[in-house]
Each structure stands twice: as structure tokens, then as C-alpha cells.
Amino acid sequence: MWDREVDVLCAGSGAGGLAAAIAAAEFGGTVLVAEKDALLGGVQALSSGQIWFGGNRYAKEAGVEDSLEETNEYMEALSQGLAVPALRDVYVQRGNEVLDFFEDRIGIKLQVIRDLPDYYYPKLPGSKPEGRYLEVVPFDATQLGDWAARCRTSPYGHGYSYVTSNEFNAMQTGKGPFVGDILAEHISKDERCAGAGLAAWMLKAALDRGVEILAESPVTRIISEEGRVIGAEVTTPEGVIRVRTRRGVVLATSGYDWNADLVRSHETMPGAGSMCPPSVEGDHFALAADAGAIPVPVRAPAQTPIFVGYKVPGEEIYGKMSQRMLVPGQPHSIIVNKTGKRFANDAFYPDVATKAWRFDGQGEALVNWPAWLVFDENFREKYSLLPSYPGMPLPEGVAEQADTLEDLAAKTGIDPEGLAAQVARFNGFCETGEDPDFGRHETPWGTLMTGDGRMPVHPNFGPLERGPFYAVPLVRVVMGVPSAGLRVDENARVVNARGDGVPGLFAAGNAAAWLDIGGGYNSGIANMRGLLQGYLSAQTMMQSNAG
């Protein structure tokens, strides 16, 4: 009844799936990775590639003081009481073991990202100004041979896949050259960076250890016997095959961005777009249901890192209309609601994303949605919006444009008096570099990521004073980090609806509920969770008796 037999089957080739595959193979197992998409690397390949973990050896080598105790303190504050302490302890206590494994034993080269603060530094206890973000060193993709073309890079532009965070930060802090010059060099050598670099490093490690990889081959059914998962069906381009697993199956299919029903149900968000591959459809929920496991919500959608972004009419990515995320905060720009008022620290995307979805129980409406990014001609000339570069015309249909703020308000439906008053008030803040309304000047992460050091008073402050003026209607953009997932135990084993671990079934990365983190988020945690849970699942499986 079986077409194939392996020790471990991994559904998905992102951070969680490849981490499990690499570790299981390194521990002596035979491994098959079944990837639904035609390209390999999953959501991690489209990310910044950051790996967040405090008290790591790379920070220590760089002279940054940190500790596991402070890491735990920061994560506890992030969790808002929604994390399971035992799972958070696993993240903190075993994180360095995982990082050491992938560098020292597997050979994936990591480096600390300098000058990048925790999201909530210095406000949350235990936060640090730098040292907790790691990234891979650039990877020479020619080492992959023919596999290089099958390893995902960003379709949204080379800047996402061929520039390191260190290089970007050096430019932002005045310590390094313009990243455009570095970008050209990386592209010419096919040196993959960021998430694309992490994906390439991991794919090479998997191939070197004999891991078999099938693309365009989703896992479509879990097979159990007497309560234990013993295999799965995989739908390949040549037909369905039945794979017997002696040790287990790892579900690492990411979130559910492109499943409108799941996004509506778990994020209470109709019509959201995504920058993730269209294969991210929540397959792990249906697969785990075969073994008696159900999705569990961890936090309210308002606490989930869902971006704001904008549509680019005429641009298709993955065969769908492009919706790009926005990391706001550049000078000469603000974000306003329909009354024309700012409602958040619009130089810190988590604050914008949270307050954009604030519900008014008395009026039965979202008080800050719809929302617009409003900017002037200085913004377009200096920064613009991708896919347009500074000074280029904006893509047709992205923004409304008018010579005056009054005419811009008339075109968009924004209250004209409210918008005029808000722009005048914000322009006054630009003279002092302080924002008493929302603290735009108080977030070091936002200052580094979106500020402009050339501004005379503060990197995030520049007045809206030069017409024409522009207003971009914002949309919600989910990015693979969900509010709900599969419950797992300390070894990344899936827990069923009765609270029992399912023998032979594991989940890693965004397929696993964020019970180890809880209500908050910090960039780099998603990739670290994938590495950790993939490693833990492989270690557990390979130490168990073969089924």
C-alpha cells in the first residue's frame, strides 16, 4: 500500500520544514520534503531573514552585553500574559543550542546585525539597543547549481533579496555606502542575502545531506493507525503517492494568507491581501484534523503583525494584483483616517496596524479605517513608493493627486478642515522634532528603519508643504504570521483537541500556534521559531523508536 518509505516527511520548505529536514538527516534519518509551490524556501525567503534571539554568542563577540534572563524578561512583557511559560522557556533555554547546531555542525554562517534595536526598546523591560538580531552572511548561489533557479527570491524587487540588514543599517547610520551600489555587486555575483540567503543556505545544507525534495507536491492527507501518524499522501505532478514514515510528519506549511475564509474567521479581516506565495492556504489545519487536532487562537487579530500596505494596479505578482506592505515613517508623510487626523505613531508600523483596526462599539464601525498615507512632492522626489524609485512618477492608480490639500480631501472623502488642521499641526512638530500626540520621535527602531539622517531636526520629521499632494488608500496586508495555529508541546509535537500529543505528528514555524510568544511580536522571531521547532521535532523523532 506504500509507494515510498522514509524516516521523516516534511510538508513545506520554509525555515521550519528545512530545519527539520536538515536536522533529521544529520541525525541519520532519511528525509523527504514535499513543497506545494514550484519554488523552494517558503515565506522565509521573502522575509528580511532576521533571526531574533537574546544572549547569543554573536552579540557577546561584538561586545554587546545581554543575558537569557533579560531576553526572557522582554519576551514576557511582549506576551501580554498570553504565552505558555513552559513553551517560552524552551525558546529561551534552547535557542543557543539551535544556533550553535546550525552554525557549528551544519555550517550555516551567521552574523550579528549591528545598531538594530528591539522593537520596543527602551520602553519594555529587558529590551536592548542591539545584538539580538542575526542574519546569514551572503550566500553564493552558484553553489546550488541548477537548484539556484528553484530557490525563491523576492518578486517584489532585488532589494529584498540582495542586501543585508547590516548593509542597510550602515547606510542609514552614515557608516556605510549607498545600498544601491552594494546591491548591484551582490546581484552580479548572485550572492543571496536576507531571507533569500537564509533559504539558499538551508537548501544547500539539505541537499548536501541527501534530503530528497519534491516541488509542486503538496501533502494532501495524513494517514494514521491506532492513533499514530504513520504516513501521508503527497500529490505530485505525476500523481498521488503514499509515503510511509517511520518517525513522523512535520507540518511546516506557514499560515493561511491566501485562504479568505480562514483570514476572515481568525483575523476578522475580509479582503486582506498578502505578499506571501499563493501556496500559503492553511493546509496544516485540514491535515491535522485527520489526526484530531484543531486550530487554536493565541491572540486578538489586533495584536498580530498584520501590515498596512497599498495596491499597485497593473502589477501582478504570483498572478494576482500586487499589494505591497508599507513601513511608514519617512519625512514629509503622515497617516490619517477619514476625519483627516493622525491616530498612531506613524513611524512605527505595529502601532499603525493595531490602531487601524480599533473598533467603536457605540458606532459599530472601525474608527480609523479607511486610512490614507498622505505626503507631498518632497516625499515623492526623495523616497517615493515601490515599485517607483525616488523622483519617478508614481504608478498609475496608486494615489490620488491634487495641487492643494483641500482638493486632495475632496477627491478622497477625507474631511478637508480636519486634514488641513492636522498637516499644520504636524508641520509644527517638524520644527521641534517632537510629537506630543503619538511619540513619533520616541521609537529608535522606527527612526533607523524609515528615518532620513539628512533631515535637520529629526530623521522622521519633514513638513508637508510642497504641492502637489498625494493620498494613497491603505489596505491590510497579512504576512504569514497568523493569529491561530496548531497547539504543540515542548518538543513541537502536535497536541490534539483532547490535550494529548499526537504520536508521529509535529508542527514548526507559523503552522504552530504562537503560544511560546503570546500577544506580541518582534521581527526575527518567526524565523527563529521555525529553526527551533524544526530542530526540536527532528531531534524528538530521531530519538524515538521507528514505527
Image (cartoon, rainbow, N blue to C red):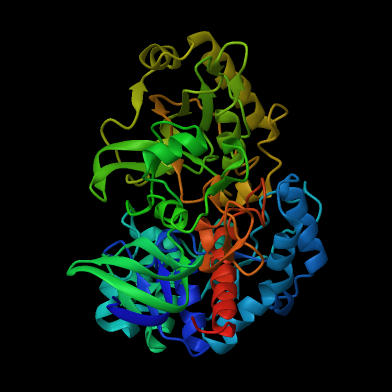
> Which quadrant of the view contains residue 496?
bottom right
Residue displayed at 55% across by 29% down: 356
Residue 534 in view in this figure:
yes
| Residue 291 sits above or below residue 370 on the image | below
| Residue 204 sits above or below residue 67 on the image | below
Residue furthest to the top: 417
Q: Nearer the viewer, residue 203 or 115?
A: 203
Q: Classify residue 421 as left or right of residue 35.
A: right
Residue displayed at 52% across by 47% down: 482
> Which quadrant of the view contains residue 502?
bottom right
Quadrant the N terminus occupies: bottom left
Residue 394 in view in this figure:
no
Q: Nearer the viewer, residue 534 or 224?
A: 224
Q: Locate residue 178, reporting x and y percent.
A: 46, 61
**Count of numbered circles on the image:** 0
Q: Classify residue 162 as left or right of residue 77.
A: left
Q: Classify residue 464 as left or right of residue 403.
A: right
Q: Locate residue 10, reporting x and y percent.
A: 42, 71
Q: Locate residue 71, reporting x and y percent.
A: 76, 62
Q: Nearer the viewer, residue 117 or 392?
A: 117
Residue displayed at 67% across by 72% down: 95
Q: Nearer the viewer, residue 527 or 377?
A: 527
